[in-house]
Structures are given as C-alpha cells and as structure tokens.
Image (cartoon, rainbow, N blue to C red):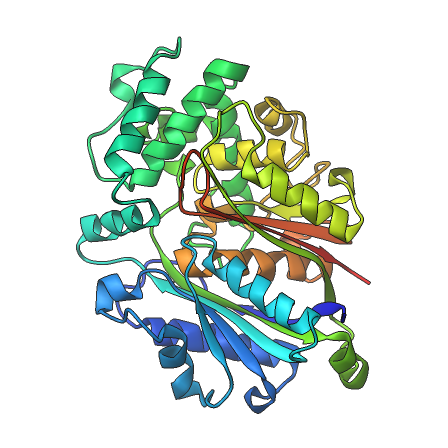
C-alpha cells in the first residue's frame, strides 16, 4: 500500500462575504492548491468535495461538488460529495487518503467550501440545528440541561443572553459547566485560551478576526451562554480550502520537494456515553498515534476543533497533551501558545481564523502543512516536524457525531 502525501494546499481568507457565491470561493481555493502543487487540473484522477449548508441557503441540495468543479473544467473523473457537518472537509481528506493508500488513484483533490453568512442572521444560526438528531433534539437537550442543573455550580444571572446564537454554543456551554464542576476549570482559563488564539489570529492573513484581545477584554465581551463570552466562540463565516493528495509512485516521478507525508488518517463516530468514559476524540487519536508510530509528546504543532474555547481545552486533554482535567492549567502555563511546549491553533483556530463548516478541516490542514514546510512567517513554530489536526462534526448522543484525526510528518 502506498505512502500518501500532501503536495499542494490553498485557501481563501475566511470572513463574512454577503456577495459572491460558493462556486467562487471553491474556485479560489482550488486554483491556489493546484498552483501550490505545480500541477494541471487535467491530471487529477478524482475529487472529494465537502459542503453542508448550500442547499439551505440556495437550494443546491445535491451534486454540490460537480456544480463547484464543472466551471473549472473538472469532468469525467469521479467526484464524491461528503457531508459530515463540521468534519466534512476532514472526511473528504480521509476518503482521498484511503483511495490513494489503496492504490486506486495517484493524484486526487480534497476540497471544502461553505457560505453561511446571510442578511437574515437567524437563518444562519438555525442552519446549525441540522447538525443534530433533529427528531431527538428536544429530548436530548432536556436531558443535558437536567444533568447540568444538578451540578453544584452557580451561574451568574447576567452571564447569558436570550437567543442570537447557534445551538452549539449552548451544547458547548453545558459541557464546559460540567468540566468546571468536575475538575475546577474556570472561566478565566477559557479567556486565556481565547486571548491566545486572538494573538495567533492577528498573525494570520487568512483569519476572519485579526485583532488581539487581552484576557480581561475577552471576559468583558458580550455574554453568550455561560461561561462563554462572544470572543470565546467561533463566528459565522464563509470560505474554502483545498489540498492535493498524491501517492509515493507519483511523487517519485514528479520529484516534489515540498511534499508532506500523511502519517495517519482516522475517522470515527460518537455515541451515547457516560461523561466519565473515554471521549471519541481519545479513541480516534489513539488509533492515529498507533498508525503513525508516535505519541502525544511527539506532536510539535496541532490544530484542534475550538468552536468555543472549551472545545480547545477539552481536546488538549483527550488528545493526550495533558492529563484529563488539566486543559485549563495547560493554557495558563503558556504551553499551547506560539513558543510553548505544544502550540495549538497557531492559525487562530475556529475562534479567530473562522469556521465555514464545510471548509474548516482542510483549513487546519493548510495551516499544519504550511508549518511543516517552514513557510508560516511570523506564526512559524520553530523546528516543527510532526503535526496533528483534530476536527469534530455535529453532535450525536453525548459527543461529536464525527471525529477525525490526521497526523502529518516532514520527511
């Protein structure tokens, strides 16, 4: 079975673009990735394309990848559409990796594009509810609320607003409250994570938010759902990202000297579980570490799914970067910032780089490939040789419906 490599990456700047189309965003990322790889589109043998919400906003419910790529001259080859909520782009990469690994293709594309911002802000927020089990949603939220209400945690009356947010902010808030009660993590630790990501985002020309914020500024921002303030939460936004994947056989012929090896690609599915048992991210990441032949301490830089600051805190624990319950302390110690022991979300993360659902997983890949090539400029992690991306999608049972972990190595 072939080793698999990333030879090209490209992305748009993430932001709120009320004008323009999904096709235009996809075309920009596509063209940048091909240029970076030094290939022509006619040489691609297959494409895997991620999008979640195009149908909700523009009635494009089917053949989304074909519609995106047809104007770019991509016809005849297989185009596979992937929808896995926020993990759709990582799923596209996993399928691309699997096909090349199996020897089916030598050169393929993974692409993710999304356009969520809308003049009707509540339409944007409501779209996220489709990333849940819609029929079971009222029952499940009721169960979670009942569990959290039983916790010995005082919620400030002024710490929440009514409406004006996606349902995922409430779900993450419930998880954060449980963690605070169980382990003693604090709202200030979440603010430290958010402030760190604002520092990182300010260095990233592709980030949606490029404004530094102090810890106190984060804490004083508009309350959303306790313990979150607005700047602890990922924004609604638009964008696209892409990667070109190839086999070892193709690489030997083409001689690409900026290729990065995909050491592991693992996809898993969440389930109903007691909160004290292993998170799906831990299960998937341990499989990925075993395949790659590395341990958590070998990772030099990571991009993780921080739809809220608590998402990053939790993932640093389940990925093994620190003991469970110590994610807040890890951030307080400065270990996850640029220059720290394990820099996390040097792109600014979902909180600041932005989170166009169908593109986020490949934006993470763009960042770590850039880091491993030593081309990240002011946000470069010195000596980075092994990188990890973790991307969660949707919500099923008591955790992410889809969980993807990829490990990359510089050869």
Q: Residue at x 68, y 62 (%)?
A: 375
Residue extending furthest toward the left:
120
Relative vertical location of residue 128 with respect to residue 77 in this rendering, above or below = above
Point out residue 36 in the picture as x, y percentages from the top left corner. 62, 76
Q: Residue at x 44, y 26 (%)?
A: 176
Relative vertical location of residue 7 with respect to residue 192 in this rendering, above or below = below
Residue extending furthest toward the top:
152
Query: Residue 380 or 4: which is nearer the viewer?
Result: 4
Relative vertical location of residue 118 with respect to residue 105 in this rendering, above or below = above
The answer to whether residue 105 is visible is yes
Point out residue 17 in the picture as x, y percentages from the top left corner. 31, 63
Residue 248 appears left or right of 37:
right
Q: Residue at x 35, y 12 (%)?
A: 150
Q: Residue at x 42, y 31 (%)?
A: 218
Q: Quadrant of residue 42?
A: bottom right
Quarter containing the C terminus: bottom right
Query: Residue 177 or 133: which is nearer the viewer?
Result: 133
Residue 135 appears left or right of 388:
left
Relative vertical location of residue 229 with respect to residue 339 in this rendering, above or below = above
Point out residue 235 in the picture as x, y percentages from the top left corner. 36, 47
The answer to whether residue 12 is visible is no
Q: Quadrant of residue 64?
A: bottom left
Point out residue 179 in the picture as x, y percentages from the top left corner. 49, 21
Residue 196 appears left or right of 24:
right
Q: Quadrant of residue 51?
A: bottom left
Quarter containing the N terminus: bottom right
Figure label count: 0
């Amino acid at each position: 079975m072939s080793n698999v490599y990333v030879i090209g990456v490209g992305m748009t700047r993430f932001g709120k673009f009320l004008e323009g189309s999904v096709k235009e965003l996809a075309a920009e990322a596509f063209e940048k990735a091909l240029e970076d790889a030094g290939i022509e589109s006619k040489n691609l043998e297959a494409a895997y394309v991620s999008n979640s919400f195009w149908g909700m906003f523009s009635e494009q419910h089917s053949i989304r990848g074909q519609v995106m790529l047809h104007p770019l001259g991509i016809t005849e080859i297989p185009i596979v559409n992937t929808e896995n909520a926020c993990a759709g782009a990582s799923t596209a990469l996993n399928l691309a990796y699997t096909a090349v690994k199996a020897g089916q293709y030598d050169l393929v594309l993974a692409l993710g594009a999304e356009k969520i911002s809308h003049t009707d802000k509540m339409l944007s927020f409501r779209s996220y509810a489709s990333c849940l089990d819609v029929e079971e949603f009222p029952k499940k939220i009721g169960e979670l609320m009942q569990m959290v209400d039983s916790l010995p945690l005082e919620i400030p009356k002024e710490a929440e607003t009514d409406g004006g947010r996606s349902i995922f902010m409430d779900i993450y808030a419930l998880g954060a409250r449980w963690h605070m009660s169980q382990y003693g993590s604090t709202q200030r630790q979440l603010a430290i994570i958010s402030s760190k990501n604002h520092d990182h985002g300010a260095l990233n020309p592709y980030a949606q938010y490029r404004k530094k914020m102090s810890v106190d500024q984060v804490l004083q921002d508009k309350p959303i759902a306790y313990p979150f303030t607005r700047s602890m939460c990922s924004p609604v936004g638009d964008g696209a990202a892409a990667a070109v994947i190839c086999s070892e056989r193709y690489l030997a012929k083409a001689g690409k000297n900026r290729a990065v090896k995909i050491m592991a690609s693992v996809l898993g599915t969440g389930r109903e579980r007691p909160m004290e048992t292993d998170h799906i991210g831990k299960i998937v990441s341990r499989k990925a570490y075993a395949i790659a032949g590395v341990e958590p301490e070998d990772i030099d830089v990571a991009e993780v799914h921080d739809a809220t600051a608590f998402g990053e805190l939790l993932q640093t624990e389940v990925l093994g970067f620190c003991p469970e319950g110590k994610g807040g302390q890890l951030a307080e110690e400065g270990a996850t910032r640029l220059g720290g022991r394990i820099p996390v979300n040097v792109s600014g993360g979902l909180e600041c780089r932005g989170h166009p659902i169908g593109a986020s997983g490949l934006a993470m890949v763009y960042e770590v490939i850039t880091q491993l090539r030593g081309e990240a400029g002011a946000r470069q992690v010195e000596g980075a040789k092994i990188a990890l991306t973790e991307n969660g999608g949707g919500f099923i049972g008591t955790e992410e419906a889809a969980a993807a972990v990829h490990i990359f190595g510089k050869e």
